Amino acid sequence: MSSIDEAIAKGKRRRKSAAIFSLIGLSIIIAIYFSWLFLTKGYAFSVYPDDAAKAPQFSVLSGTAFFISDKLYVIGSTADVTVSAAKYKPTKLTIDGQSPSTINVKLVPLPATLTISTAPVVPDISWYVNGEKVAASTTLKTELPEGQYDITAVHPFFNEAVVSITAEKADVIEKELTLTPVTGSMTINSVPSGAAVSINGEEAGNTPLTMTKFGGRYDVSLMKEGFEPLHDAIEVSNQRLSPRRDYNLQALQAQLSIEVTPPGGIISINGKPTASNASVSADVSHSITYEKPGFVAQRKSVKLSPGEQKTIPFELAQEMGDVSFTSSLTSQVFIDGVNRGETPLRLRLQTLPTRVSFQRGGYRTVEKKITPNGNSLTTVNAEMLTEFDARRRDGTPLFISTLGIQLSLISPKSFTMGSPPNEQDRKRNEYQRNVDFSRQVWISRHEITQGQYAAFVGQNKSKQTKDAKQPITDVSWEDAVAFTNWLSEKEGLTPFYAMQGKRVVGINTNAKGYRLPTEAEWEFIAKMNRRASPTTFVWGNQQRIRDKQGNFADASLKGKQTFILKDYDDGFAGAAPVGSFDAERGGFFDLDGNVREWVHDVYSVTPPQSSGTALDYLGPTNGNKHVVKGASFKIGRLKNIRASVRSGETSAQDDIGFRIARYEN
């Protein structure tokens, strides 16, 4: 190719590139135009009042927008703008798609700033603007809208001062008011007259005295030989231009200083309580008394010369009184916590409020407060009662009542415990024994619950606290006995069981403390109490369980244990809350079922050697097992629900609980 042809080709390529770039530029311009056309929205602003509209100022706070003159162009959805003008408050606006194309903006003028001071400078001036109080201060600083105002300064020591001002928008106004004091007169008289008067420390003359004074507060002193100095403050104000004072001067005083032992009592001069240092009239006799509880009061008289100073000492002796202490039973007497002996006792005590307590083991402590009398014998007597008897006398609920334990009193009579030889399904260990009773017995109507037992061991230590009304189980015979001893201690009763640690080492048959029912007592309430003759079952002699008779092994345990009561449903697969079933005829609950129950007796299979009647029978004395009575939710055979059924157990089980008893007399 020749150089001419190459130049022509090169020129064509340059023209083609220029055409392409021109086309691209034109496309960009067209795109910007259409973006402007479709994405940009314009708003016009109309500002008033007229003087604000002369030179308004616009600015964009946020959003994609810009002003051209008074036109706002927004690219996007919203923009925040401000409109302002000289001497006007800026106004903030939010512009969005709902805003009109022409936006009217009314600007609020800036207030005038007013500062007014006074000459002289005075604190606590009351400031009024057009008759309305706006401040109480030395200087008034406030803002005022455009207008005419009368500013008034009021102070009790000065005449009112008024200034009128014209407030323009955004003005800064500073004024000073000249205050002129009010003029009045002050009159001072005294009896006797002729007292030297000084005002604010400067001599002013002698009484009677009248002086012209400007408004203000004046410290006034009067002095006259033979009389006490007098000090006062007098104000001359626009409320009282001519104050007058008439003073009665007091004769020159004498000074008393009173020293006392012991401290803390009451000093009186002429019957009026006073401090240890006092001013008293001279040349007059004064009666001074010092008294304190528990001490013999003293009285002294004194007469002092004008201006004399004297110290008067008082030293009081203790006042003692005789007190006799007696009690229904010999007791230890504690005076303010110190053991002073046993009753009967006679002591000489200081005549002060005294705390006395009578104490005796096993009895409620008797607390008394006495104040011995220095002139006569004071007698103090205490009736010593066990905690139990004291609670019954004063109507305080027994401790067991606070736990919800209910007792029934029974008067058991003689019967034959065990089962007769002809009783169906009788077992060999149900041997018979004739028993009789000499004492009434309280027995709990319900089995002891988890909640009641938890109070004994502590809620956090209880094995079973899920349901407080469930009968307590999984407790050993010793655990049950410890619970009864705890109840006895809580009620001040002598414990029935003697224990060393967790082991029972003896019993006190004369004690009225709580215990487990004996087997004889348990059988009596299960088959003799309020019955014409002994019954085989708690409910009677019928070889049939009626619906909802009690809590036994019902259909819910089918497949879980060998024996169940077929077609019987008591509603509970395990133990039921105590009292879920009707009480038997004597008012006791769950005797026939729910859980088996520990009783007091040692278990033995050896029949009694004597055929005589055992009085208040407590069972054998030796053995390592204890008798368990009654049926439970695990018993599924009728023959094992009989009232005479008994077993001997050594350890806690999940269907053995207990109820409690105690002798009444």
Image (cartoon, rainbow, N blue to C red):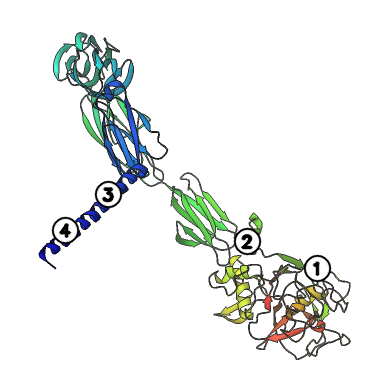
Residue 26, which numbered label?
A: 3
Nearer the camera: disc 2 or disc 4 = 4
Q: Residues within 10 Å of mark 2 (few under 14, many from 20)?
A: few
The residue identified by callout 4 is 11
Q: Nearer the viewer, residue 180 or 611?
A: 180
Give whichever of discs 2 and 1 has the lower sequence position.
Answer: 2
Percent x, y for residue 409? Answer: 75, 66
Nearer the camera: disc 1 or disc 4 = 4
Identify the residue shown where x is 11% and y is 62%. 4
Q: At numbered mark 4, what does the secondary structure look like: helix, strand or loop?
A: helix
Q: Residues within 10 Å of mark 3 (few under 14, many from 20)?
A: few
Q: At numbered mark 1, what does the secondary structure look like: helix, strand or loop?
A: loop
Q: Residues within 10 Å of mark 1 (few under 14, many from 20)?
A: some
Relative to residue 148, is residue 585 depicted above or below?
A: below
Three-letter code, disc 3? Leu
Three-letter code, disc 4? Gly
The residue identified by callout 2 is 402
Q: At numbered mark 2, what does the secondary structure look like: helix, strand or loop?
A: helix
Three-letter code, disc 2? Thr
Answer with left or right where residue 64 lies relative to residue 561: left
Query: CB atoms at circles 3 and 2 under 8 Å apart?
Result: no
Nearer the camera: disc 3 or disc 2 = 3
Q: Nearer the viewer, residue 1 or 442?
A: 1
Identify the residue shown where x is 53% and y is 55%. 367
Percent x, y for residue 255? Answer: 24, 30
Query: CB atoms at circles 1 and 4 under 8 Å apart?
Result: no
Q: Residues within 10 Å of mark 4 (few under 14, many from 20)?
A: few
The residue identified by callout 1 is 586
Give whichever of discs 3 and 2 has the lower sequence position.
Answer: 3
Percent x, y for residue 150? Answer: 28, 14
Q: At numbered mark 3, what does the secondary structure look like: helix, strand or loop?
A: helix
